[in-house]
Image (cartoon, grey):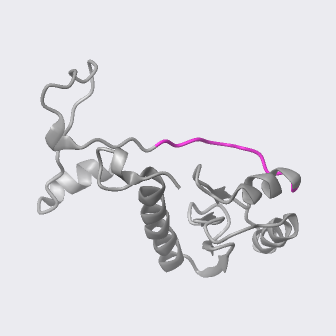
Amino acid sequence: MPSADANPVPFAPWEIADIEERRQAEVVRALGQESKIWAGGMASFDAPGSWINQIINAGSDGAVTRDDVEDIARWFAERGAEPKIVITPYVHPSLRRSLAEAGFVLKTIETLLTADLPRREGQPALPPGYSLHMVDKADPDDVERYAQ
């Protein structure tokens, strides 16, 4: 794997993805009615139509087969939920291949961009209409505005 030393942030992108995926997997596990470990990640179910019905951090623990994918798709179908699997660019390549073989399709893409804020001086200004605001976690109104 490439070295994180060449990056201006203290973690390599795949390390940040791993930390964030594990955090999100724990959240959906804690909030869902049911959960199970699947392909190194967490499959969670709450109720039909719930945003919690998803798998996070799959493909982080080695190869995933088409049979594995079809088994978890049945687990969601038995609960009346669409199987949704969140992946990062750093998953085991077999997961993407097995998802395609089982008929899964890409529905959305979400990209997380990071910046080392203390180093923003001297960098180009943000585009019109964009701003940076540090959320004051001690201010309930500020936290609520951020959440909204």
The residue at the point 47 percent across, 75 percent down is 26
- Across and down, in percent, residue 147 comes to 32, 53
Can I make out residue 132 in this image?
Answer: yes
Residue at 68% x, 58% y is: 84
Measured from the top left, where is residue 54 in percent x and y?
63, 64
Magenta region, residue range: 102-111
* Residue nearer the viewer, 6 or 86: 6
Measured as percent of width and height from the top left, residue 79 is found at: 75, 73
Q: How many marks?
A: 0
Is residue 118 a member of the stretch shown in magenta?
Answer: no
Kindly indicate the quadrant of the structure image that contains residue 108.
top right
Where in the figure is residue 111, as x and y percent of width and height? Answer: 48, 41
Horizontally, residue 135 falls left or right of residue 148, namely: left
Q: Is residue 93 above or below residue 121?
A: below
Residue drawn 64% across and 66% down?
58
Query: Residue 144, located in which quarter of the rendered image?
Result: bottom left
Residue 106 inside the magenta-drawn segment: yes
Q: Quadrant of residue 20?
A: bottom left
